[in-house]
Image (cartoon, rainbow, N blue to C red):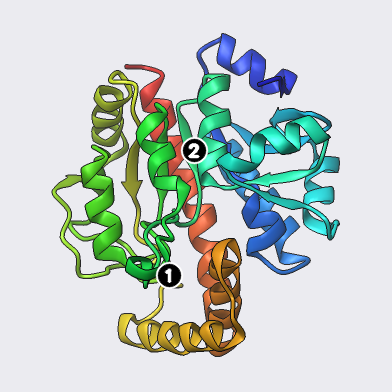
Amino acid sequence: MRLAVSREVREALQARRPVVALESTVISHGLPRPVNLETARACEKAVRDAGAIPATIAIADWQGVVGASDALLRRLANEASVAKASLRDLAPLLAGGGLGATTVAATVAVAAEAGIEVMATGGIGGVHRGADRTFDVSADLGAISRHAVCVVCSGAKLVLDLPRTLEVLETLGVPVVGFGTDELPAFYVRSSGLRLAHRADDPLTAARIARAQLARGAGIVIAVPAPDAHAMDRAEAERSVERALKQADKAGVSGAAVTPYLLRALGEGTEGCTLAANVALLEHNAAVATAIAKELVSL
């Protein structure tokens, strides 16, 4: 893949200074305007303030962009024709010169090729509810297993089948390490009730576990609970998810459109509480990822 690595990111990587990759689908498909651009900038600032270089990843002008300019962030936030780019979409977008916002799967792939070891996001994709009928499983899971990148997130998105998502990650050999928690966070909700096998209570411990996994040529998930002040009540959130799932089924929504639809429906059904939680956890995860990245470069 042809990469356009910003000078700032390239120099940081060459000097072994910490770099944190950020996905861009949240800008184009995950958050409403103008919060999307504000949050993209805030996440980059959180990385800088914590002592690393941010590298927002996207596809533009026949190449993978590693370290998007502010002009490109504005395009991702405001243009209507931005493609949601997962692994299957990379080759067509690169060949056609289209503008694409990268999912976790595509971001991990591009970050690994650029030599970036840590990325931050909100929640990863996983096994969708009803996957026994639809076979709908996010490419994020396989991509993390195949690329040596530490993915810092608030667990998997609440709208997914979380027990099956954990099972698939286990099958793929991906450690899911709770950051200060023994249970899997569920995006807006601090705990899903699903117990994790591994835990790290500080960035250095997380980095040591990550280094051992990355040395195997495979990825790892560091699961960080959403900030308590913005987290949602678990029972209330589950009721909202059930309502959103019924709406999606009635509307005939399927495939890649399901998760954005459900998240929008959740936002409407909770009077914006999910939006506040999403923004808060994105910024928090960026800061945690930076702390881990700083420890990683010293190991």
Residue, x 58% and y 9% (percent of image)? Answer: 14
Amino acid residing under circle 1: Tyr
Is residue 293 visible in the rendered image? The answer is: yes
First-in-chain label (2 vs 1): 2
Circle 1 Cα neighbour tier, 10 Å, few/some/many (<14 / 14–19 / ≥20): many
Report x, y in % for residue 98: 81, 41
In the image, 116 versus 225, the foreground residue is 116
Quarter of the image with the N terminus in it: top right
Q: Is residue 228 left or right of residue 65?
A: left
How many numbered tags mark residues here? 2
Which residue in the protein does label 2 denote? 119
Q: Residue at x 70, y 29 (%)?
A: 64
Does 153 sit above or below residue 57? below
Question: What's the mark number on residue 210?
Answer: none
Residue at screen point 35% across, 53% down? 224
Name the foreground residue: 58 vs 191. 58
Residue at label 1?
A: 188
Q: Say which quarter of the image contains residue 293.
A: top left
Which amino acid, by three-letter code, is at mark 2?
Answer: Met
Question: Residue visible at 83% across and 50% down?
Answer: 74
Tell me how far mark 2 sits from mark 1, CA to CA. 19 Å
- The answer to whether one can see residue 180 in this image is no
Q: Position of residue 139 (x, y in %)?
A: 46, 47
- Residue 32, percent from left and from top: 71, 69
Q: Secondary structure at mark 2?
A: strand
Give the x, y percent position of residue 105.
51, 42
Position above or below: 19 against 163: above
Figure check: 9 above or below 195: above
Does 70 appear above or below 94? below
